[in-house]
Image (cartoon, grey):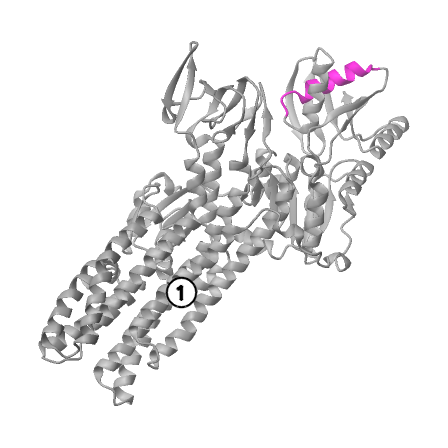
Amino acid sequence: MSAQDVTTVKVEGPAVTLDIEGMTCASCVQKVERALRGVEGVDQASVNLATRTARVVGSSEHDPTAQLEPLVDAVRRVGYGASEHTDRRSATEEARGYAVRLAVAAPLTIAVLGLTFVFPHATWSQGLAWMLATPVVFYAGWPFLRAATRAARHGTTTMDTLIALGTLAAYGYSVAADLLGRHDHYYDTAVVIVTLILLGKVLEARARASASDAARILLERGSKHATVHIGGEERRVPIDELRPGQLVVVRPGESIPADGVVKEGTSWVDLSLLTGESVPVEVGPGDEVVGATVNGNGRLLVFVTTVGAGTRLAEIVRLLEAAQGSKAPIQRLADRVASIFVPVVVAIAASTLVGWLALTSEPAATAMLHAVAVLVIACPCALGLATPAAIMAGTGRAAELGVLFKGGEVFETARRADVVLLDKTGTITRGSMSVTDIVPANGIDDRTVLALAAAVEGGSEHPIALAVTDAAGERGLEVPNAGHHRVQPGLGALATVDGVEVRVGRPESRTAALTQQVDRLASEGRTAFMVWRDDTPVGLIAVADEVKPEAAESVRRLRHAGMRVGLVTGDHRATARAVAAQVGIDDVMAEVFPEGKIDEVARLQRDGRSVVFVGDGLNDAPALAKADVGIAIGSGTDVALAAADVTLLGGSLTSVADALDLARRTYRVIVQNLFWAFAYNVVMIPLAVFGVLDPMWAAAAMAVSSVTVVLNALRLRRYNRGRARGTSPTPTRGENVAALSV
């Protein structure tokens, strides 16, 4: 398998997000997903009950996302509304809508209960209860009745079908009893069902709003205005009017309005909003800055490079929303159950009614109440919210800590991970290298060696390339012009300099003298690479990189979490072992090409291991894609970030342990939620069938189940960075894992 084959495995087609109206339960999710997948050209469709959105991915051959009409029509045909995603309707607004209806229902319900229990047989009391119950059922309960009617019109059933059937059965029976002059009315049952379900909806919507706060907070922290510097004058403009190429003034304490480059001034920038790191970063002329981060104590003049949807903040929010809209594989079980759940419950309720009438001497009213209890208790709200609520809370908290998960499947694969492979340069080390040694060969002086290397490396963002070009600039060398630049991952860079091909890369095919120099430099922890001119070696250049201060602690945390940790690098073996010794890693795979990294990951997977690969460079991308969980350092290349399952925005190695810990906790919450959602129905439905639960208690229990699932997910919002550091060491799997080194 080639590097290109591996890195394209995880690339998906064009995607669009839709707002879906009318969804209330897991069966709604199933119907909308089936409708969207039936549209020509749709490759994937994932509907999220918690966010009321659908993410549709089109195929490369036929892109349905270019025109939304077929998608919207497909959703409408199954009884729901759809529109292009906006931020206009939030869970908080949904809670307000339910709260208004609850404010009407609650006092009327109390009045109906008072009439029912204080004046149970008074004719005037029954008539007044009828009058008070009517607005509760048909105004406060209108969202449920409307949704049930819409579903019936399209030949489907939802949670609202159960609520509507239960409420109308109790209300209709009571009206018939009044008209026939009987006293056995159940207006109290009808209004209590509506009121308690409305209360549950308000609490659930507010809890969902808390779970999805992360994306909203990120967007709100962006600047609303910018101070544009034009012709020596400063003018305050709305952020929407800002354009690339303009200069903006950022005063101390202000948010940087857009991505750009510092032209004048020095300061420090607080990146904690985007990376979760509390340590400020010093910036000066030539340094890149990110929109929505906070300027420190200096005045900056920033050249704007990117605005609006192209900024780093906007991209992070898009990735977060995509992750929050995704599903974990474990959700498939809930989806299969939801697809047949409501029809089965209606059948059980009908059987309950017939059974009580046929097998007992209880009156018809009692049989009806037991059937109503079955309908109300079985609402699959909790089942639909179990997974998305946990994913929303987990990914939201992770984003606040500078960790971006790309999908719900990461949580399931991360729990099985038992091996972590770390790249060296830019991952364990800072990646900010400096030239320490130049060893000329074949009669070429050291200045020429460095100048040739700088010509080839010009324009590259690789840490070694930057070290070479910086060293040439510091020494005042005249760097020759170069053309036809190209990169061969794992081998190095090539270019044409003065009509001659010059290559910079791994020190291969070297003389005995150069081999001795390479070994000496490696033993001192330095990385040596060779410069060739027309395939003739002209010298060695050595660079040194500083190990990240948190690297040793991060490795210790991973080992205490039961992980086997290995170092995989293309660097010289002696250099790799010197770095590994500093951070406490025993297993070292050095002088490994990109294909070798893939082979090592594959070998461990064949041995039954679940592998996490952490890297940042172009040559890490194939291994990131091949691993069970690929984690890319946020300071790395675009290819590495695209191939990974998790992105660490801050570039701190500490976040690797945080990401894996939070992923495992999120998966644990998903399992808990699904267990309780299933257990609730398994226990409660039989109780309702046998008459142990009446409809009012059933409504209360149903509301509590939904709220409980969301509140359990919200525990993830309290996760603190590095909370596992203080835990006592657990036995590592090292004794049972085969040696990682080849």
* Drawn side of residue 722 relative to residue 717, left or right: right
- Residue at image mark 1: 705
Instruction: Please tell me whether residue 597 belongs to the stretch shown in magenta.
Output: no
Q: Name the image quarter holding residue 608.
A: bottom right
* Quadrant showing the N terminus: top right
Q: Main secondary structure of the magenta part?
A: helix
Residue 363, can we see it?
yes
User: Residue 445 in the image: x percent, y percent?
Assistant: 82, 14
Q: Is residue 706 above or below residue 54?
A: below
Name the secondary structure under disc 1. Answer: helix
At which x and y percent is residue 432?
69, 28
- On screen, residue 660 versus residue 449, left or right, reads left
Instruction: Name the residue located 37 percent from the left edge and 62 percent from the top edge.
Output: 381
Residue 700 vs residue 71, the one in the foreground: 700
Indicate yes or no whether the magenta region holds residue 447.
yes
Q: Position of residue 440 (x, y in %)?
A: 83, 19
Residue 224: image location, x then y, percent: 39, 29
Magenta range is 444-460
Locate residue 111 relative to residue 542 in the image: left or right. left
Which quarter of the figure has residue 488?
top right
Q: Nearer the viewer, residue 276 or 344?
A: 276
Callout 1: few (<14), some (14-19), or many (20+) C-alpha neighbours within 10 Å? many
